[in-house]
Amino acid sequence: MHATRRELLIRERLLRALDDDTARITLLQAPSGYGKTTLLRMWVDAGRATGRLLWVTFGASTTTRNSVWEQIARAALREGFVTSLQLDDLLTLINSDDFEKRDLIAAMRGEGAFTIILDGYERLGDLARVIDEDLLRGTEHVPGMRAIVAARGRTALDQQRLQLQGRVRVITNIDLEFTEEEVAEFFSLVVGTSHHATPRDVYEATGGYAIAVRAAVLELSRTGPRAAHWRENALNSTNLSGQLPNAELANFARITSVVPYFDSSLARMLVPGTDPEAAISVLEADGFGRHIAFTRTSRAFQYVTALREALHEELRTESPAEYKRAASIASAWLGGNGDPEGALDLTLEVGDYELASRICARLLLSVVEAYTTDRYESRLRHLPQEVLVAYPILAFVLGLARLANPVLRSGAKPLLQIAAGMRIPNGLSPERRSEYLCFKVFASRTLGRYQESAELARQVLDLVAAQGAAGSSTTLSPVFTRGAALSLFLVGDVKGAHAAVASTFVVPQSQSSRNLSFSDAAGYKAIDGDMPAARAMLAQIDDGAWAATSERGHLGTFGHVARAYGYLEDREWALARATLEDIERHTVTSDLWPHLQEPIMLARLAQGEALAEARRVEEMLDGPLATPGSAESLGIFRVKAFLVVLWLAAGRPARARKLLDGYAADDFRTLPARALLALVDGDADQSMRLVSRSLDFVKTPRMRMSVHALGAAASLRAGDREVALSMVGLASSLGREYGLVSPLLLLPDSDREALATLSRESGGADDVAMFDALDVATTFPEVSAMPQFTERERVVVHALARHASPARIAEELFVSPNTVKTQLRSAYKKLGVHSRPEALRRAESLGLLRDRSDD
């Protein structure tokens, strides 16, 4: 096959229209066959684009907003505008919780002018409306940004309003039609002279329809019968599928059409024995396609859309075996060249499930939406049960997708069970075996099987450590390592979790990935109570590397928890709550939901809102909190332990006892809560015994400080001042070393005040400073110290919630206003308040406005 000297017509008037960037968006809007892509290629090849250029052609698999911007990000990688690690940062941003409110282009932090060409825009379907808004917002707010869109159908970008505002310029099919002069010029360029037709004949026969003009001219350039019958041959096959010059080239084109674009290396694999450079040369010379930038140093060939669609369908329906072979080869090539989703679609279409499983494994490493949305549900939903059982990674991805969709969630468990029970094939490399183990870790944890997940996590971490000790370069990706660490953390192995995450600090990774590692490490340390270490980890986070995910993002949860604890230790209760209360995407089914609650529970306790917070948390536990989140992980147990504290602080000991009744009396995890209950009940000796037993099990600074403080209170109540002083000293030592003060919130007010007095009389300066640092009032009223209201005072306090004035209360109760005033003064005194708002807040906290039968 040899290239001809045929040329494409340089249509200068259209190139000038593309040069005009006064409107930041140019829309080429015309049906197939009008030469939109050919024109864009000509414009790009002529070097007329200003600044950087990204070209993205959409396929039918583009179904989400995030996948659109992922393709743009991958185009930036291919063009050399970003490195692979910077791509990871971009993908993290795209899949972040607040990407809906931000522009990816702004996050790319590019300097100078750049143009994005979006071809095949009609394939976005209804999604186009969302991308329209992105483009309008981006071109308005990002300096130097320009977008050129090629679409067959209507889009919101063609609104007259936008054209009148000068924001969008529309080039339609009327503009793209060949003029009679252009037909004559093209005829002269390709045909020269012909006794079969004149340029005017071609123009009248085709009406200037670009694909028909090209077909007619190509027919006339040939010799023999085809030239004589140019009119019927051209007009009967205006999609160009019948215009390929010979059978060999037609076979080459048909097989290579399996993929949206290809280079010579792929073409050699798809069509062995063919000279791909020569074939591509002929195809390009005849106008069947154009080269596109593939990487900074190489190019790929892309067919004219209409031709590719015709050839692709022909291959799929007439040669299914050949199609399957070609699709499997092309899928592997696409996956290795930055288009994993296109590769997945091809593998699923032809039933190459082994390759689809490998692609999904890669997606789980790079696409956060695989865990947080139902993005892949539509691709995998039609797989039969036997395929899912045989290829459990596919079952895992489908299970995650259904878990993320409330409507489909009930169908997730069987799929995750398949993944959790997968058999790991023999003969795998240590790296692949580690990946399989990690999928079992994630699936087991998602099912709420936390102990099983943690044991598997230890296996995979031990496997990698053994490989390292043996001199192997096998490492676990930071994504998998952090996942294994989380499984350890959820069963209380905080030391193991932190060690695992710390191992990722030295692994090459993107800055946003490094941020996640430091974020997790900070959270583990803060929950433990090591605030200096937590603050040091937070200081390592580069906020600029994930500007759109750090504020409210799902991925940095543990970092948010660490910051909230930091505010607690600084006595900034409102900031501690605000840091966590509105984090997006944290449903009650999340493994991390409990750890978001702990700082909020403590902050509301400090603010005197124990009752309201106890009700909120218990309603969550009893209501919408469903599996997997409700399984007894470390987090759920800790939430229940804090809930015991809240109920006691609210004067509801029966509710606290009910929670503890759900655990064995000798469950060591419950000992601190039982010690507090005994203290509130007035049994100081029993409280001290429980404290003594607790110290054999409690290891973290935060919990040891709490237990020492409880022991000091119990000792002082029992009259043993020396032991009380000793335990106060132990608590203050921990508080000073680890920057802690919030554990003192677990003490009843009267005990904290008594210990503060003892410290001033006989303790050290550090002891006094510890109590002086916690300047809160009525955070933990004892049951024995609850206000004792008369029945009339209780009725008046209830009425106070409905009426602002004594006169209105008197009307309702049929008594005199003076009587109401007297009863209110007495109630205020017992509550220790001086105003109606203070009285209502205090009464609500004590549960006086809403009686419960079990108290």
Image (tube, rainbow, N blue to C red):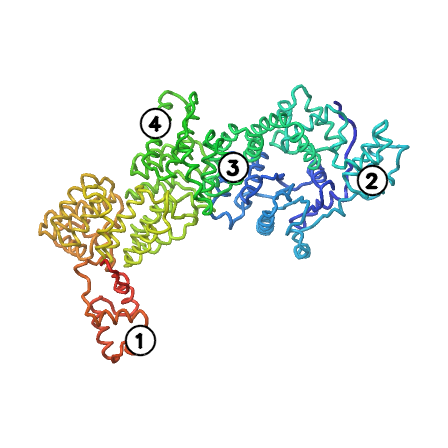
Q: From the viewer's perspective, is residue 326 above or below residue 724? A: above
Q: Position of residue 530 (x, y in %)?
A: 28, 42
Q: Could you say whether the residue bearing mark 1 is in a helix, strand or loop?
A: loop
Distance of mark 3 from mark 2, alpha carbons? 49 Å
Mark 2: amino acid: Val
Mark 4: amino acid: Asp
Q: Could you say whether the residue bearing mark 3 is in a helix, strand or loop?
A: helix
**Residue for badge 4:** 462
**Residue for badge 2:** 183
Q: Position of residue 396 (x, y in %)?
A: 45, 35
Mark 1: amino acid: Ser
Distance of mark 3 from mark 4, alpha carbons? 33 Å
Q: Nearer the viewer, residue 817 or 326?
A: 326
Q: Residues within 10 Å of mark 2 (few under 14, many from 20)?
A: many
Distance of mark 1 from mark 3, alpha carbons? 64 Å
Q: Could you say whether the residue bearing mark 4 is in a helix, strand or loop?
A: helix
Distance of mark 2 from mark 1, alpha carbons? 90 Å
- Residue shown at 70%/36% (left/top)? 304
- Residue shown at 52%/28% (left/top)? 355
The reply to whether callout 4 and callout 1 are in contact (CB within 8 Å) is no
Distance of mark 4 from mark 1, alpha carbons? 70 Å
| Sequence-earlier tag: 1 or 3 | 3
Mark 3: amino acid: Leu
Q: Which mark is residue 380?
A: 3
Q: Residues within 10 Å of mark 4 (few under 14, many from 20)?
A: few
Between disc 3 and disc 2, the foreground one is: 3
| Sequence-earlier tag: 3 or 4 | 3
**Residue for badge 1:** 805
Q: From the viewer's perspective, is residue 808 above or below residue 279? A: below
- Residue shown at 29%/36% (left/top)? 493
